[in-house]
Image (cartoon, grey):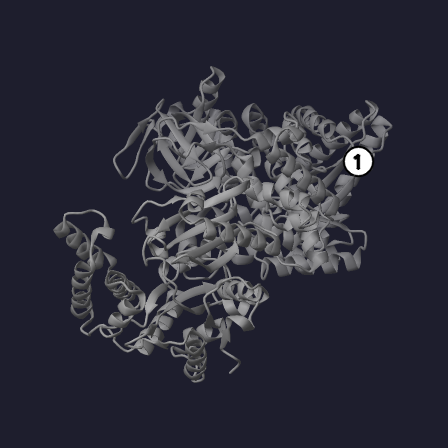
């Protein structure tokens, strides 16, 4: 076995993998000559061995014994000695900070005999018995799995008997009585006496820390923070120093800057005559750290010097825990402190201005997720609110409005000036107009990649999905929660798309100044936060290799994407242009029984499509615009088969001929699995009139823009290609139409023709397809569905949570790219596609294009650009810059 135990003098801050964050930082402070109690660290290797084998390595016991002996020699005391005991703490410490998720036990070494030695050593009977009762209480909860309330009730009873609410009023006799009570609880709950052997106490505490790595709360935290489950935790054994020796002692927490705002100053809390858990538990009220200057000026001055030393050394905000023992300051822990999104941006640029880091390093100190937090409006957390339910946080933001239950009402109410929240069981493409009109969307079904979620994120619209505790009654125009709250149409609700929480009534909203900055409405030089965001965005743009485009289907979205820094359009979904009033024209096309009627419907649609494309090309003048030809199956533009069947059946002989024909068409086009049926390139090859009309509209729109002096750069994307033969035929059809329009108008606009890679076969045969396609764009939503065999609209709500609990994946593959499976297909397609066509331009237009972690993958895979919703463009720009910096510096993410 490798070395399993390291003295603090043997480690440093770069050994976090082995010593954990706490152990590595204790070693670093020791090396800096700061006042750190001596101790040693049991490595994560030992923990991983224990978790795998169910027992510790044979060499661990002797190594711990050797280091314990060295610690005893250094301190001049023996662990648990009856006359002059050495006491130690046993503390967890993983590579990544997991505050409060794992275990700590203080005062190891106390027993019925050594408690008297501690009293003599400290000159305080009360202190000794207080320390002993703390040990039994912490040991009982942490090591012996006794419910904490058993001890808390005993303390409350002792204080009640004393006639006080303050634990400091309990004297030595009271605490000695509590010790006996606590020992009785241990005996009663475990069937054994509290262990009196100090080494047994320490060994059992170490095992408890190892086991706490897989405690429910630790597992949940790791999933939330995406911390790998196989890292394990180190264990730190540290000589005890005491903040509960009297009013000249105490314990506290300090930050070198405000973690909420990033402002420099004195931030933290201090509690006299207390140990660390008293501060965390809130047993007594702390005082601001500034008060320590009055209480103990010498220790305060020393602490300020140490805080400055640590911030300059770590070159970052530091979170510090300390204890003062009878006027002597001891440093118990430091780590790079967690901070809010706003603080992260401020601190990064402040450190640049101080000369501590450069702009490359500053980029690694912030993240796209933090930028997203800053971009969306938020509810005022301090307000008095009534929570209805909590569901899936589908699209961030804060929205307040009156509940409405269909899209027509949403539009009608919004047109008369009402703010509305569209409430549906689930949404479909027909709801788009209502979604646009609404301030936010709430659905009782679906997940983060449902229709409502995807469209809402694309529009920057607040959305909460999958609120399955709500019974949505569309006919009755109300919903009822599991808790019995009923909301009728017109009642005001508030939805938080960041947390997934739904509130009754109006919750005050705080607007985002960052969005106003990206919109060009605010001068960044007039605000510290906006200045920080601006500087980091400029540097990210300078450093990034990846282009960033937007998924946008209309002129206003394109204009917003351009203001937000988008370098073109990576996906225009033309099917969205066939909804609303135009749906009747599509129905006429589908129902056409002869070529003349079919062509008349196409002729009616073409000028409308042409106008759409003119608007988009004008908004993105001089930048590429990738337009996907119609992708979904035609049945999506027809009424629901069940609803229409019922309507015709109820009407009987009175059913209209139009309804009968419509029902016949719906049944004819019905497919068991339409997402794998007649759609995409297949639809264009079987019914070529529709995609050819679209190509003609694109070509005419480009010619119109060129005549107007513009610089149109359209790109035509063939969806769902799975073979080179499909691509060759579809391309030939498109090129023929482009040539015809060029001859008609006298203007030839260079138009790339490429394909969407969303079928695994296309990725595997990318080399062949690239011989005909001039560009690839990965449709990672469908590619993920087909690779995993998942139905996106079904799986998130049915079993994804269980899959995450079981560790099958740490995050939904629809949220962050599955780099091993789907990612391998992407790499194959990039490699083989470029081998066949070296100038092949490659991007991604699925939801993953705006996901921070996925952007890093696409950078490494060699893509040319990512495309995402307009609101995610700044996030993708920032992450693309960070990816380039991390690649060139060989550094790790500092978040």
Extreme-left residue of the structure: 161
Q: In the displayed structure, would residue 119 be above or below residue 482?
A: below
Q: Which residue occupies the foreground of this view, 283 or 540?
A: 283
Q: In the displayed structure, would residue 638 be above or below residue 23?
A: above
Extreme-top residue of the structure: 416
Extreme-right residue of the structure: 746
Which quadrant of the figure has residue 767? bottom right
Q: Residue at x 33, y 36 (%)?
A: 387
In this view of the protein, can residue 74 be seen by the observer? yes
Q: Residue at x 79, y 58 (%)?
A: 836
Q: Position of residue 403 (x, y in %)?
A: 39, 26
Q: Which residue occupies the foreground of this view, 567 or 336?
A: 336
Q: Which residue occupies the foreground of this view, 510 or 866?
A: 510
Could you classify mark 1 by the number of other residues whose Cα lies within 10 Å: few (under 14), some (14-19), or many (20 or more)? Answer: many
Which residue is disc 1 drawn over? Answer: 738
Q: Secondary structure at mark 1?
A: helix
Is residue 558 left or right of 425 when viewed as pictured?
Answer: right
Q: Position of residue 736 (x, y in %)?
A: 79, 38
Q: Position of residue 716 (x, y in %)?
A: 73, 40
Is residue 150 left or right of 817 when viewed as pictured?
Answer: left
Is residue 831 left or right of 99 when viewed as pictured?
Answer: right
In this view of the protein, can residue 592 be seen by the observer? no
Number of labels in the image equals 1
Which quadrant of the figure has residue 15? bottom right
Q: Position of residue 443 (x, y in %)?
A: 41, 37
Is residue 208 left or right of 497 when viewed as pictured?
Answer: left
């Amino acid at each position: 076995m490798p070395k399993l135990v390291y003295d603090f003098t043997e480690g440093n801050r770069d050994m976090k993998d082995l010593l954990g964050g706490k152990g590595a930082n204790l070693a670093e402070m020791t090396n800096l000559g700061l006042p750190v109690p001596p101790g040693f660290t049991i490595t994560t290797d030992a923990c991983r061995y224990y978790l795998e084998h169910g027992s510790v390595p044979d060499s661990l016991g002797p190594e711990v014994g050797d280091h314990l002996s060295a610690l005893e020699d250094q301190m001049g005391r023996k662990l648990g000695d009856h006359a002059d005991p050495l006491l130690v703490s046993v503390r967890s410490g993983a590579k990544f900070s997991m505050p409060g998720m794992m275990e700590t036990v203080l005062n190891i070494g106390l027993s019925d005999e050594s408690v008297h030695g501690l009293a003599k050593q400290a000159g305080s009977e009360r202190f000794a018995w207080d320390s002993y009762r703390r040990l039994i209480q912490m040991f009982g909860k942490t090591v012996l799995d006794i419910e904490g309330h058993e001890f808390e009730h005993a303390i409350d009873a002792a204080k009640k008997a004393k006639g006080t609410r303050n634990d400091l009023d309990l004297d030595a006799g009271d605490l000695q009585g509590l010790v006996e009570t606590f020992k009785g609880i241990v005996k009663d709950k475990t069937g054994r006496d509290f262990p009196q052997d100090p080494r047994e106490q320490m060994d059992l505490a170490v095992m408890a820390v190892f086991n706490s790595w897989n405690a429910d709360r630790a597992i949940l935290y790791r999933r939330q923070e995406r911390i790998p489950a196989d890292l394990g935790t180190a264990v730190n054994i540290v000589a005890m120093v005491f903040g509960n020796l009297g009013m000249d002692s105490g314990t506290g927490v300090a930050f070198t800057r405000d973690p909420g705002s990033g402002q420099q100053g004195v931030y933290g809390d201090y509690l006299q005559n207390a140990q660390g858990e008293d501060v965390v538990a809130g047993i007594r009220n702390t005082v601001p750290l500034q008060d320590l200057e009055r209480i103990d000026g010498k220790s305060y001055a020393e602490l300020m010097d140490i805080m400055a030393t640590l911030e300059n050394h770590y070159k970052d905000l530091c979170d510090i825990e300390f204890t003062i023992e009878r006027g002597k300051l001891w440093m118990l822990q430091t780590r790079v402190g967690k901070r809010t999104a706003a603080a992260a941006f401020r601190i990064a640029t402040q450190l640049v201005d101080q000369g501590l880091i450069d702009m490359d390093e500053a980029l690694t100190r912030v993240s796209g997720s933090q930028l997203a937090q800053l971009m969306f409006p938020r509810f005022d957390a301090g307000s008095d609110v009534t929570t209805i339910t909590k569901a899936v946080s589908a699209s961030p933001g804060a929205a307040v409005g009156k509940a409405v239950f269909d899209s027509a009402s949403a539009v009608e109410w919004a047109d008369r000036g009402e703010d509305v929240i569209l409430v549906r069981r689930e949404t479909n493409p027909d709801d788009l107009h209502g979604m646009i009109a609404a301030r936010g969307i709430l659905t009782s079904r679906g997940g983060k990649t449902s229709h409502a979620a995807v469209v809402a994120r694309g529009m920057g619209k607040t959305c909460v999905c999958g609120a399955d505790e709500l019974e949505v009654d569309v006919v009755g125009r109300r919903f009822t929660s599991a808790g019995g709250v009923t909301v009728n149409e017109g009642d005001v609700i508030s939805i938080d798309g960041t947390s997934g929480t739904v509130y009754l009534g109006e919750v005050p909203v705080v607007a985002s100044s960052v969005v106003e900055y990206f919109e060009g409405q605010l001068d960044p030089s007039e605000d510290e936060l906006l200045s920080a965001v601006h500087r980091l965005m400029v540097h990210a743009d300078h450093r990034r290799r990846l282009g960033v485009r937007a998924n946008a289907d209309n002129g206003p979205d394109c204009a917003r994407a351009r203001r937000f820094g988008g370098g073109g359009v990576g996906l225009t979904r033309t099917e969205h242009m066939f909804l609303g009033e135009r749906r009747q024209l599509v129905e006429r096309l589908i129902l056409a029984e002869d070529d003349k009627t079919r062509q008349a419907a196409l002729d009616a649609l073409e000028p409308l499509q042409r106008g759409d494309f003119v608007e988009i090309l004008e908004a993105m003048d001089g930048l590429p615009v990738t337009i996907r030809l119609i992708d979904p199956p035609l049945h999506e533009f027809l009424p629901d088969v069940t609803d229409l069947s019922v309507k015709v059946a109820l009407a009987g002989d009175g059913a209209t001929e139009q309804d009968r024909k419509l029902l016949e068409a719906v049944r004819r086009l019905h497919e068991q699995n339409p997402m794998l049926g007649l759609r995409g390139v297949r639809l264009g090859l079987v019914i070529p009139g529709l995609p050819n009309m679209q190509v003609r509209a694109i070509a005419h729109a480009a010619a119109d823009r060129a005549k107007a002096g513009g610089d149109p750069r359209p790109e035509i994307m063939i969806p769902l290609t799975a073979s080179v033969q499909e691509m060759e035929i579809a391309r030939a059809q498109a090129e023929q139409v482009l040539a015809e329009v060029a001859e008609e108008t006298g203007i030839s606009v260079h138009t790339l023709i490429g394909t969407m890679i969303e079928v695994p076969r296309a990725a595997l045969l990318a080399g062949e397809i690239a011989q005909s396609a001039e560009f690839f764009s990965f449709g990672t939503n469908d590619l993920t569905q087909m690779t995993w065999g998942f139905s996106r609209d079904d799986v998130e709500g049915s079993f994804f949570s269980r899959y995450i609990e079981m560790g099958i994946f740490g995050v939904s593959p629809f949220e962050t790219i599955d780099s091993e499976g789907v990612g391998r297909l992407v790499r194959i397609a990039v490699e083989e596609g470029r081998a066949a066509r070296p100038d092949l331009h490659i991007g991604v237009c699925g939801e993953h294009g705006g996901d921070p972690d996925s952007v890093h993958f696409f950078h490494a895979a060699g893509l040319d650009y990512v495309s995402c919703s307009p609101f995610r463009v700044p996030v993708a720009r920032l992450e693309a810059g960070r990816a380039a910096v991390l690649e060139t510096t060989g550094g790790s993410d500092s978040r």
